[in-house]
Image (spheres, rainbow, N blue to C red):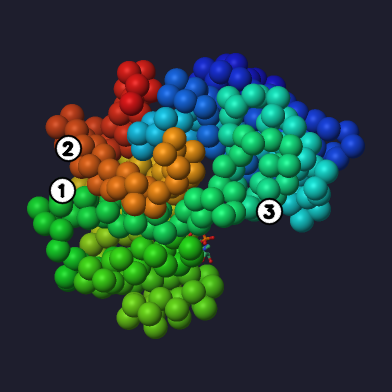
Amino acid sequence: MAVFNQAEFDNHEQVVFCSDEASGLKAIIAVHNTNLGPAVGGCRMWDYAKDEDAVYDVLRLSKGMTYKNAVARLPFGGGKSVIIGDAKKIKSEQLFRAFGRQLERLNGSYYSAEDVNITCDDVALMNKETNYVLGLEGKSGNPSPFTAYGTFLGIKAALQHQRGHQDFSGIKVAVQGLGAVAYGLCKHLAEAGAQLFVTDINQDSVERVVNDFGATSVGIDEIYDLDVDVYAPCALGATVNDETIPRLKATIIAGCANNQLAQSRHGEVLREKGILYAPDYVINAGGIINVYYETAPQGYSEAASNKHVEGIYDTLTEIFARSEKEQKSTHLIADELAQEIIKNGL
Ligand code: NAD
């Protein structure tokens, strides 16, 4: 299996393969970069078809956390972990405690948290063996409202850049996915006067947003064809792709979903079409910013967290301006900004 010479390896500082016979734990912890501080990134549980897929996933995600944390101007490096196996079958206290002991061995160079298939309860079990975990119940709390606020501010920054105003009246926004983050986003948008067009595979979630915010319900696939100003992907990754881009009438793409571009080249396709894309890891950093305040020397403060989240507006404004000036897509500018911060410090 290629490790050092695969593109995703990208000079990872440390990659640890862990196992524990008694609990059946098989996990990989990847520490990409600790220039700005200890690596922070969640733990994902997934039933990978091959070990190679788990390696690829953890390396890709951990590098992504380095960039996300840097652009959010957090004193965190980037890391991620994966536990290999079916979440419906392998979860046990023994397994999470064994994983916690592995975290403890890294002596604080990596802090773990929730990600796909890992709940607050699972992290609490890791916490029985180590303090190198974040996002515990009763600390910084649910990150989603902070992600929603940051995403709303990101849409505002995009409007300001593209249209020269931040007035949401008459602005039509298509919101795809109406989960924890999108509900809060819809609330901000509706209060600001935007007109909402929404979809979700879960009908109850649709009804709630229709009833609470006067949104218009649209079909799952119809969301790409609407005559709207903003497309806000808030469910799945890779929805900006060769099939959907020609259908989009929105001139702004700004939502909370991770990995929105199917491939990096789609960022350039958007720029050529005059569609302003708010890079996903910049606009959706509100949640990780809030988690940071759990570790802040002065203790957790919601006000301080919100103030930091408001910086997302300025960061996106800077990225949009540089993208225009340098005639380069916004996601490449975001990567460059991250690399500058990682190299030069916060
Ligand atoms: P969630 O699970 O609460 O919501 C996702 C919603 O998408 C669900 O309501 C689901 O029914 C819906 N959905 C799934 N497939 C769909 C489809 N094909 N079409 C329409 N709707 C579909 O998740 P969330 O916490 O709100 O996160 C949403 C996205 O934002 C995810 O990509 C997540 O990784 C990302 N994100 C979340 C946070 C956070 O703070 N929660 C932070 C950063 C990034």
Q: Are marks 2 and 1 in contact (CB under 8 Å)?
A: yes
Q: Residue at x 59, y 49 (%)?
A: 136
Q: Which residue is mark 3?
A: 121
Q: Secondary structure at mark 1?
A: helix
What's the amino acid at mark 3? Asp
Left-right relation of 139 to 182: right
Task: Give the label, 3 or 1, closer to the camera.
Answer: 3
Q: Secondary structure at mark 2?
A: helix
Q: Earlier in the sequence, mark 3 or mark 1?
A: 3
The answer to whether residue 344 shows anywhere in this view is yes
Closest to the observer, 118 or 262: 118
Q: Which residue is mark 1?
A: 161
Residue 268, percent across and down?
A: 30, 38
Closest to the observer, 116 or 96: 96
Left-right relation of 125 to 209: right
Q: Which residue is mark 2?
A: 321
Task: Give the label, 3 or 2, closer to the camera.
Answer: 3
Residue 317, percent across and down?
A: 20, 42
Please determine whether, in this image, residue 306 is positioned above or below residue 281. Answer: below
Q: Earlier in the sequence, mark 3 or mark 2?
A: 3
Rendered image: mark on residue 309: none
Closest to the observer, 266 or 38: 38
What's the amino acid at mark 1? His
